[in-house]
Amino acid sequence: MDRRQFFKAGLTGVGTLALIKNAWALKYYPAPSDKKIAVLYSTWCGSARDAAVWICEGMGGIANVFDVRENPDLTGFEQIIVGGAIRMAATSPELQEYLNKNQAALSSKVRGVFAVCGNMKQPIGPEQITALIDNHLAKLCGVNSVPKHVFLGRITKALMDPQTAQMMAGMEDYDNLKRDECLAFGKEILEFITKG
């Protein structure tokens, strides 16, 4: 193959990939289902991603899991669970922007909300649920009477941007996210959806 053909083949391949960019999206396709359920999350270090996947597992693997950074089109989904990692008492700007932009289309479909936060390694209490869910995430979603949960999270400084890692220099990495809590919340949401 001469240089010109090689170059053309390369450009064709890159162009094809650009056209099918959604094939590379951070989607998790679990068990096939006639239910059209999506779990939308935002994360910084991966704890909210893991929580979202485990919530899906708790639902029997029937939901699709989407990272908000992929700007997913959720119009075809009938039920949506929304969650995100918390930093400075708020979810990521990307999730906030996505929910503000799509609230009218999503609010009637949201069936659960969750947050993941370190909470200084302290147990989660009603004040965290009020502050992080009721006064923040539920408001962004335009809902108030759906299942909600705040999970303890984790810190992995190697996955943080340098500025944030430096702010937490004196803190050791830890992992308080519990898979069984996420599975139980997934079951709770599925029961909520089933009772409809």
Image (tube, rainbow, N blue to C red):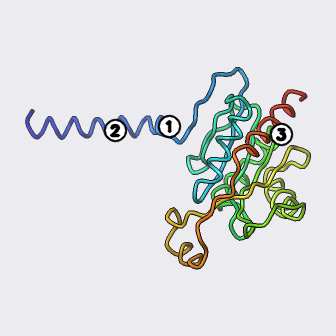
| 2 displayed left or right of 41 | left
Question: Which one is nearer the viewer's eye here, 134 or 191?
Answer: 191
Mark with earlier residue (2, 1) = 2
Mark with earlier residue (3, 2) = 2
As displayed, is residue 35 above or below residue 179? Answer: above
Mark with earlier residue (3, 1) = 1
Quadrant location, the N terminus? top left
- Mark 3 near mark 1, Cβ–Cβ under 8 Å? no
Res. 108 mark: 3
Residue 141 picture location, percent across and down = 79, 50
Q: What residue type is labelled 1?
A: Asn
The answer for how far apart the CA atoms under marks 2 and 1 are is 13 Å
Q: Which residue matches tag 1?
A: 22
As helix, strand or loop, the secondary structure at mark 2 comes to: helix
Res. 15 mark: 2
The answer for how far apart the CA atoms under marks 3 and 2 are is 38 Å
Q: What residue type is labelled 3?
A: Ser
Question: What residue is rendered at 58% in x and 66% in y?
Answer: 173
Question: What residue is rendered at 73% in x and 44% in y?
Answer: 182
The answer for how far apart the CA atoms under marks 3 and 1 are is 26 Å
As helix, strand or loop, the secondary structure at mark 1 comes to: helix
Residue 89 picture location, percent across and down = 75, 68
- Give the class, few, some or many, for how many residues have Cα within 10 Å of label 2's Cα (few <14, many ≥20): few
- Give the class, few, some or many, for how many residues have Cα within 10 Å of label 3's Cα (few <14, many ≥20): some
Q: Which amino acid does label 2 sit on?
A: Gly
Which circle, 2 or 1, is nearer the viewer?
Answer: 1
Question: What residue is rendered at 71% in x and 71% in y?
Answer: 88
Residue 98 picture location, percent across and down = 67, 52
